[in-house]
């Protein structure tokens, strides 16, 4: 998802110092409250680790605007793509145990694994699954897991071979969740237990992450201390529940709290040594996870802001230099809920922020302020600066979200001409039917993707989903045969600025059955 895509935070400019500056937690607490108010965030939980000590772990606001239940340091949020680092660490642990190698071929562990290109199928290694260099495009194939579908891991693996790559193997970075779903299945095959069980028994429990679970459905019914996401629309917040991306498995399914995540931060900053003194994974494997496996051009704006010389992606971690320091991190996003993890290993500093609204800027502002204190940088009002950019960008995006009137309007054929079942090889069936005189669409594997069709021009319609909070209106263009019946169809988002990239309608090749 765009929100699930790692968020590279543009951090502050200014000189760094060799001395360690104590983070002012009183100041940070005020910044958190200010940021929540400015960005209209109902609830937030923050933990800061400094020199192997948890110096701050606290919740703010409410878990749900209608219940008023308070967020605390143990409140569970979906950490979404911050799950990816856990999947990488699980594989690192198995590497340490001699059960696999980073350079093992995927087909050695998943014989049925098959991609569009035979060469890539044969040469894909474990490390390739974790570094977004498979050749698949941004979010390609995500409709097999988002919104919640009825597809099993076997179904997902079977669909991979139909996804035509967007670039050549290992040549470009493109964020892709399905490779991490595949990596999670490698964990399962090698360990002999499900990815969920392995993560809980071999990672969360040893880390003493007592409230965390590898999937929303695994949260005990007795634990009501979990947050619901909220989506801003029409100048008000709308609670929006999703199951913390449970279908994403190794790509994004973990539920955790600020307190629990602080133990994860301490372990990362200690080279894999857990707070109990035991080794979760070795420093040797951490070096692999923290090494850039694919890079991208440093941006001019990032260089001007914090002297960025490089940026890239390791194994489950985004990596960049920041004022000469190595900075690791990741963002996580669900509709209505976002999280951010930031590490400065040389300063032994870690920050985790969880929230139940989808404004990344609110989290970035808090992160900026912590780093500003830690590195004694120029004092700036990060909340106001980022809020201004956030709301200006949002206003511009929504202003351009409505489709322009067609240049040459053409009438449609009778509704019945468009009805029938369409099939995509990797997704499955999509049904177009006429109900009460109106055309409707049904993505048969996805309960949340049902909607109606509004005529645009000719054989092109706009799909209006029943759940408006998805913000995923899409064009569907029907190709007709000589009998004026549908032979195939293509879809694309009406607005790529508003619609999350995991609604990858653009990758569907629908043909009439």
Image (cartoon, rainbow, N blue to C red):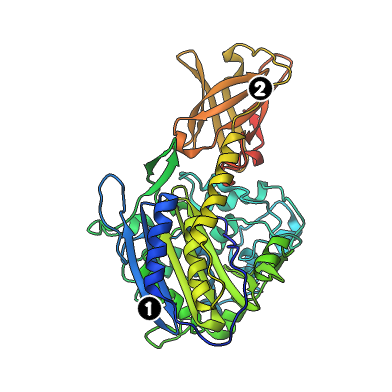
Corner quadrant of residue 416 = top right
Place of residue 374 in the rendered image (x, y in percent of width and height, measured from the top left): 50, 78
Corner quadrant of residue 472 = top right
Place of residue 169 in the rendered image (x, y in percent of width and height, measured from the top left): 75, 60
Distance CA(mark 1)–CA(mark 2): 56 Å
Which residue corresponds to the image point at 57% horizontal and 51% vertical from the top-left?
389
Badge 1 marks a residue whose secondary structure is strand
In this rendering, does residue 96 appear at all?
A: no
Residue at the limit of the structure toward the left, as seen here: 222
The first of marks 1 and 2 along the sequence is: 1
Which residue corresponds to the image point at 66% horizontal and 29% vertical from the top-left?
489
Is the C terminus in the top left, top right, bottom left or bottom right quadrant? top right
Where 27 falls versus 386 (above or below)?
below
Local packing at callout 2 (Cα closer than 10 Å; few below 14, some 14-19, many 20+) is few
Q: Which residue is mark 2?
A: 405
Local packing at callout 1 (Cα closer than 10 Å; few below 14, some 14-19, many 20+) is some
Apparent side of residue 35 relative to residue 320 in the rendered image (left or right) = left
Q: How many marks?
A: 2
Place of residue 491 in the rendered image (x, y in percent of width and height, measured from the top left): 64, 33
Q: Which residue is mark 1?
A: 55
Which residue corresponds to the image point at 77% horizontal and 57% vertical from the top-left?
168
Badge 2 marks a residue whose secondary structure is loop
Where 473 falls versus 54 (above or below)?
above
Apparent side of residue 448 relative to residue 138 in the rendered image (left or right) = left
Where 371 falls versus 182 (above or below)?
below
In this rendering, does residue 210 appear at all?
A: yes
């Amino acid at each position: 998802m765009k929100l699930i895509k790692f968020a590279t935070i543009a951090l502050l400019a200014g000189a760094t110092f060799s001395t360690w500056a104590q983070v002012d937690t009183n100041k940070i607490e005020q910044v958190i409250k200010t940021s929540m108010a400015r960005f209209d965030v109902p609830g937030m939980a923050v933990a800061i680790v400094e020199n192997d000590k948890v110096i701050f772990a606290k919740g703010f606001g409410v878990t749900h605007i209608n219940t008023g239940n308070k967020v605390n340091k143990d409140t569970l949020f979906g950490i979404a793509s911050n799950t990816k680092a856990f999947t990488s660490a699980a594989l690192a642990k198995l590497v340490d145990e001699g059960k696999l190698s980073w350079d093992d071929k995927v087909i050695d562990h998943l014989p049925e694994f098959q991609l569009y290109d035979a060469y890539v199928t044969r040469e894909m290694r474990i490390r390739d699954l974790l570094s977004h260099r498979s050749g698949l495009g941004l979010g390609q194939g995500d409709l097999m897991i988002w919104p919640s579908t009825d597809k099993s891991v076997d179904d997902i693996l079977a669909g991979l071979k139909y996804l035509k790559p967007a670039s050549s193997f290992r040549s470009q970075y493109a964020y892709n969740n399905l490779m991490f779903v595949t990596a999670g299945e490698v964990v399962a095959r090698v360990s002999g237990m499900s990815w969920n069980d392995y993560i809980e028994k071999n990672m969360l429990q040893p880390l003493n992450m007592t409230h965390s679970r590898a999937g929303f459905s695994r949260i005990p019914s007795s634990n009501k201390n979990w947050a619901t996401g909220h989506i801003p629309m029409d100048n008000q917040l709308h609670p929006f529940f999703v199951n913390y991306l449970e279908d994403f498995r190794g790509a994004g399914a973990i539920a955790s709290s600020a307190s629990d995540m602080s133990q994860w931060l301490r372990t990362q900053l200690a080279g894999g040594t857990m707070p109990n003194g035991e080794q979760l994974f070795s420093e040797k494997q951490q070096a692999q996870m923290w090494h850039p496996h694919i890079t991208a051009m440093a941006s001019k704006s990032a260089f001007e802001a914090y002297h960025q010389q490089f940026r890239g992606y390791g194994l489950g971690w985004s990596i960049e230099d920041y004022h000469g320091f190595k900075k690791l991190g990741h963002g996580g996003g669900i509709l209505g809920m976002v999280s951010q993890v930031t590490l400065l290993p040389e300063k032994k500093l870690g920050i985790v922020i969880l929230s139940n609204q989808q404004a990344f800027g609110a989290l970035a502002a808090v992160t900026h302020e912590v780093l500003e204190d830690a590195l004694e940088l120029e004092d700036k009002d990060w909340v106001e600066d980022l809020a201004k950019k956030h709301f200006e960008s949002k206003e511009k995006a929504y202003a351009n979200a409505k489709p322009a009137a067609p240049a040459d309007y053409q009438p449609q054929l009778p509704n019945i001409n468009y009805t029938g079942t369409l099939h995509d090889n990797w997704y499955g069936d999509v049904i177009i039917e006429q109900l009460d005189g109106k055309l409707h669409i049904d993505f048969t594997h996805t309960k949340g993707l049902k909607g109606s069709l509004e005529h645009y021009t000719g054989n092109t319609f706009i799909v209006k989903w029943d759940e408006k909070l998805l913000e995923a209106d899409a064009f569907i263009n029907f190709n007709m045969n000589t009998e004026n019946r549908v032979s195939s169809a293509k879809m694309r988002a009406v607005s790529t600025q508003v619609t999350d990239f995991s609604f990858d309608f653009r990758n569907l090749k629908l043909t009439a059955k």
